[in-house]
Image: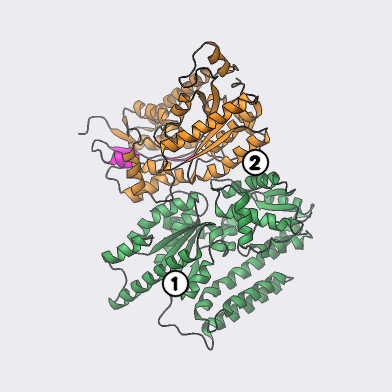
Chain colours: A orange, B green
């Protein structure tokens, strides 16, 4: 049953994990309901694998799955399929992000109209405003209303960013602090917590199904888990500034910056890099990450490659071995991470 | 300083000409062999795309010839090619190869930039001289592309097996050795004439009926480099198929390196043809692969083979929409993703099956008068089983 308000289906995949707050606020301001597809499940992955070509990476297949799940519903007026070309100057996200609305449109023949809009900020934020006006038009809102909604959404986004900044640790070695106040971990209460940096794309790391519960497992193993978002943007910029040439993938740039930063300041005990099998940018960025950390004195590094065939047991075995290895290194006198600097 | 650069089909002829003309000590890497690929694969990231691995092999083999500097094209994304140089530099430094990597970024509308970068590489030769040398090198590339257009036909009609290959090799040598634009042109004319006489002249084989014509679309490196694409064109030629390649070196340079007004106008036509299926630039040759497939169907070709390196992002986007192109236009399209693990026998089998399918399709069209028929389910099953999309 269609309600009074327009309902837009938003696939919980790819760009969703980083930008859903903006999208939801924007749609909310325009008086439109954003309906998100449920969390990723085996059924959704199977739906996606059945529709995408074999060579596509897992996140793209998961995206197909979410769109198909939305298409099964009959209470939606649109499905939101933004073409995220670029979110900052001189940078791109990934060629597959640039092609995905076409891949969906051509392969899935949706009954529900697609709300596909191109977001290209490679030449400045005018691209975002144009996209907002275009979406507003499709939803029957005027230019002024759309731009107003965008302003509110971006304001909320910035507030959210600032708030997450406040939660940032202030140069204290977290592991020591945890040890002293007695809040140890279940598995190894006598051991100090390890600080591990998890690297990867938000659509993998933030999706408990595709990441096979990586973060939860690490926490259970007594690790403090950090991500790129825990670093102030300024220190990331500083860490990446020394590169001879501009790295033109937004996410890859952040990943490499974080790796350079922690390797330089020795603020974590190890790095876990989660990549999808066949990921183009990560095939090169991952190599740079490994070489950068090695060059800066070395740091325990675990590369985890996932695809639709990956199993949780295999992941857990590797994580346990990795964590054991770091603990033994430390027992043998290797210096631990100092915690994140401000 | 001794300079080298990565191979890509016949580009080495143009590049060595330009730099030799400017008095630079330049050597092309040895021709790509299994050893090149093995060396590259050993030292490159596992999931990197095939061209990167081969070029790393090129550098390491060139190093054995005393090379200490590499000239490599840069890029601005989103395709991985634009970041090759940085990763390759890391790999070579990690090996302690002692080679310097000089990155030549595309002009991005400022043609002077590339010229000045080349001038710096030559120790500050005047831009006017650099420009003249580029024109000289360019003339050779144009001649090679001109004679290469005649090769597929000659290959199919040649009476003596292998004669086309020999003529082409000799023509390449003549053009490479040419010491002026006029000489290059003359060598090109000779080659074209020789190749035409193979396909049209006395003793030309007369095959039964009109030979099949297949378009080759896809990623530029895989299209141009026979060592990477398992000598696809030669293989199809031996199966009696005339090939039409969507991109040549000169096309690619016109598309990517020429400044605005001199840019190739074909780009717009190809993009327009791709638009119903892929409506945005996706890096590399993704849109071109789709657009050229549509254009080849309009030109009445028998089918298209789409090639790309395994995990190539733009070509994965193209391969995702090509099945629908094939269905809409009733046009057989086969995608081949290749890398160092591709087996010769596997490729040969798939090519033979595809060509069989095209032959039968042609025959059915002849029997029933015109083109365009619905596919039988058996044929669809065969196509699905072979990983061939479409023809339905």
The residue pinned by badge 2 equals: A245
Q: Residues within 10 Å of mark 2 (few under 14, many from 20)?
A: some
Q: Is residue A163 shown left or right of residue B165?
A: left
The subunit letter for the residue under badge 2 reads A
The residue pinned by badge 1 equals: B213
Numbered marks: total: 2
User: In the displayed image of the protein, which residue is found farthest to the bottom?
Assistant: B202
Residue in front for this viewpoint, B255 or B313: B313
Residue in front for this viewpoint, A326 or A284: A326
The subunit letter for the residue under badge 1 reads B
- Residue A90's place in the image compared with B131, above or below, is above
Q: Is residue A205 visible?
A: yes
Residue in front for this viewpoint, A248 or A219: A219
Residue in front for this viewpoint, B52 or B168: B52
* Quadrant location, the N terminus of chain B: bottom right
Q: Position of residue B61 (x, y in %)?
A: 69, 58
- Residue A190's place in the image compared with A116, above or below, is above
Q: Position of residue B102 (x, y in %)?
A: 71, 49
First to last magenta residue range? A66-85
- Residue B65's place in the image compared with A108, above or below, is below
Q: Residues within 10 Å of mark 1 (few under 14, many from 20)?
A: many
Residue beneath the point at 64% across and 29% down: A238
* Quadrant location, the C terminus of chain B: bottom left
Asked where in the image residue B212 lies, by quadrant, the reply is bottom left
Q: Position of residue A272 (x, y in %)?
A: 53, 33
């Amino acid at each position: 049953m269609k309600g009074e308000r327009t309902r837009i289906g938003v696939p919980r995949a790819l760009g969703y994990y980083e930008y859903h707050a903006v999208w939801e606020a924007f749609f909310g301001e325009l008086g439109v309901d954003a309906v998100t597809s449920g969390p990723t499940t085996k059924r959704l992955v199977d739906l996606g694998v059945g529709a995408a070509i074999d060579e596509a990476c897992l996140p793209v297949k998961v995206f197909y799955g979410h769109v198909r799940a939305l298409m099964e519903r009959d209470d939606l007026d649109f499905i939101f399929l933004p073409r995220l070309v670029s979110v900052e100057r001189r940078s791109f996200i990934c060629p597959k992000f640039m092609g995905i609305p076409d891949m969906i449109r051509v392969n899935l023949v949706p009954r529900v109209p697609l709300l596909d809009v191109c977001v290209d900020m490679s030449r400045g934020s005018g691209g975002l405003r144009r996209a907002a006006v275009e979406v507003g038009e499709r939803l029957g809102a005027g230019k002024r209303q759309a731009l107003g909604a965008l302003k509110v959404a971006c304001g909320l986004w910035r507030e959210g960013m600032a708030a997450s900044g406040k939660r940032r640790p202030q140069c204290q070695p977290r592991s020591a602090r945890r040890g002293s106040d007695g809040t140890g971990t279940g598995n190894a209460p006598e051991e100090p917590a390890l600080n591990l940096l998890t690297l990867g794309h938000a659509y993998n790391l933030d999706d408990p199904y595709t990441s096979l519960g990586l973060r939860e497992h690490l926490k259970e193993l007594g690790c403090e888990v950090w991500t790129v978002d825990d670093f102030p943007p300024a220190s990331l910029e500083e860490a990446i500034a020394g590169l001879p040439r501009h790295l033109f993938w937004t996410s890859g740039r952040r990943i490499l910056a974080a790796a350079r930063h922690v390797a330089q300041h020795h603020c974590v005990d190890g790095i876990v890099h989660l990549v999808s099998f066949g990921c183009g940018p990560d095939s090169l960025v991952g190599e740079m990450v490994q070489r950068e950390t090695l060059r800066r004195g070395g740091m325990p590094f675990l590369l985890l490659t996932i695809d639709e065939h990956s199993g949780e047991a295999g992941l857990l075995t590797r994580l346990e071995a990795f964590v054991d290895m770091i603990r033994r290194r430390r027992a043998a006198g290797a210096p631990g991470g100092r915690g994140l600097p401000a | 300083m001794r300079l080298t650069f990565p191979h890509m089909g016949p580009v080495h002829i143009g590049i060595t000409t330009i730099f030799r003309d400017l008095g630079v000590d330049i050597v092309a890497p040895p021709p790509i062999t299994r050893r090149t690929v093995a060396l590259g694969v050993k030292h490159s990231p596992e999931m990197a795309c095939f061209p990167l691995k081969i070029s790393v092999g090129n550098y390491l083999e060139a190093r054995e010839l005393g090379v200490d500097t590499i000239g490599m094209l840069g890029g601005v994304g989103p395709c991985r090619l634009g970041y090759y140089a940085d990763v390759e530099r890391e790999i070579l430094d990690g090996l302690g190869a002692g080679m310097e990597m000089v990155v030549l970024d595309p002009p991005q509308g400022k043609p002077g930039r590339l010229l000045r970068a080349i001038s710096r590489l030559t120790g500050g030769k005047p831009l006017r001289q650099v420009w003249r040398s580029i024109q000289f090198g360019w003339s050779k590339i144009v001649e090679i592309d001109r004679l290469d257009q005649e090769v597929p036909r000659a290959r199919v009609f040649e009476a003596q097996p292998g004669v086309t290959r020999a003529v082409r090799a000799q023509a390449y040598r003549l053009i490479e050795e040419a010491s002026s634009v006029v000489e290059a042109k003359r060598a090109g004319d000779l080659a074209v004439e020789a190749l035409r006489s193979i396909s049209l002249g006395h003793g030309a084989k007369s095959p039964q009926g009109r030979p099949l014509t297949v378009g080759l679309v896809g990623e530029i490196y895989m299209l141009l480099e026979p060592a990477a694409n398992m000598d696809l064109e030669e293989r199809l030629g031996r199966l009696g198929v005339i090939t039409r390649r969507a991109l040549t070196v000169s096309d690619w340079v016109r598309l990517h390196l020429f400044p605005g007004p001199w840019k190739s106008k074909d780009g717009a036509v190809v993009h327009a043809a791709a638009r119903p299926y892929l409506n945005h630039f996706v890096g590399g040759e993704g849109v071109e692969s789709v657009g050229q497939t549509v254009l080849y169907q309009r030109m009445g070709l028998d089918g298209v083979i789409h090639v790309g390196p395994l995990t190539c992002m733009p070509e994965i986007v193209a391969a995702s929409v090509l099945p629908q192109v094939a269905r809409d236009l009733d046009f057989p399209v086969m995608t081949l993703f290749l890398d160092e693990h591709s087996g010769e026998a596997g490729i040969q089998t798939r090519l033979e099956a595809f060509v069989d399918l095209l032959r039968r399709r042609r025959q059915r069209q002849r029997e029933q008068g015109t083109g365009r028929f619905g596919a039988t389910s058996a044929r669809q099953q065969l196509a699905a089983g072979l990983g061939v999309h479409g023809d339905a």
